[in-house]
Amino acid sequence: MTVYIVGHLAIRDRERYAQYEAGFMPILERHGGKVVAVNDAPAVLEGVADGRRLVILAFPDQAKALTWARSPEYLEIAKHRHAASEAFILMTEGYD
């Protein structure tokens, strides 16, 4: 079953965050993931927006998503994201 990872990020240091982005796609693709959406100003249909970037990733299953998230190569670049932004990241199963 497809698994989605949804991130809301407040980027404080664009230069440092760019170091994270530079290595992101090759690692994501090696683990079977794909980017579904990235938006720095998503449309708000209800509630109050907090100005965070919205990122949606898809993986074939939960095992692949967790293997990616816990992989040494991802954890290495994630240090840049942690230093450059504040985020909350969610994972959910989709409907197939």
Image (spheres, helix red, strand yellow):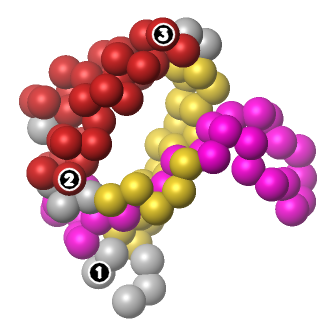
**Amino acid type of disc 2?**
Glu
Q: CA distance from mark 3 to mark 1?
A: 36 Å
Question: Mark 3 or 1, which is nearer the eye?
Answer: 3
Question: Mark 2 or 1, which is nearer the eye?
Answer: 2
Residue 2 percent coordinates (x, y): 33, 75
Residue 89 percent coordinates (x, y): 48, 43
Q: Are marks 3 and 1 in contact (CB under 8 Å)?
A: no
Tag 1, which secondary structure? loop
Tag 2, which secondary structure? helix
Q: In the image, what residue occupies the spot 83% across and 42% down?
A: 49
Crowd band around label 3 with a 10 angstrom C-alpha radius: few (<14), some (14–19), many (20+): few
Q: Quadrant of the C terminus?
A: bottom left
Tag 3, which secondary structure? helix
What residue sits right under mark 2 in the picture?
29
Q: Is residue 53 magenta?
A: yes
What residue sits right under mark 3 in the picture?
15
Q: In the image, what residue occupies the spot 18% across and 41% down?
A: 27
Marks 2 and 1, the one that precedes in the sequence = 1
Q: In the image, what residue occupies the spot 44% across and 85% down?
A: 95
Q: Give residue 1's mark.
A: 1
**Amino acid type of disc 3?**
Glu
Q: Is residue 52 left or right of residue 16?
A: right
Q: Is residue 95 left or right of residue 44?
A: left
Which residue is more in the foreground, 64 or 17?
17
Which residue is more in the foreground, 48 or 15?
15
Quadrant hosting residue 71: top left
Which residues lie in the magenta part? 39-66
Q: CA distance from mark 3 to mark 2?
A: 23 Å
Answer above or below: position of 49 versus 44.
Answer: above
Residue 1 percent coordinates (x, y): 29, 81
Q: Is residue 27 visible?
A: yes
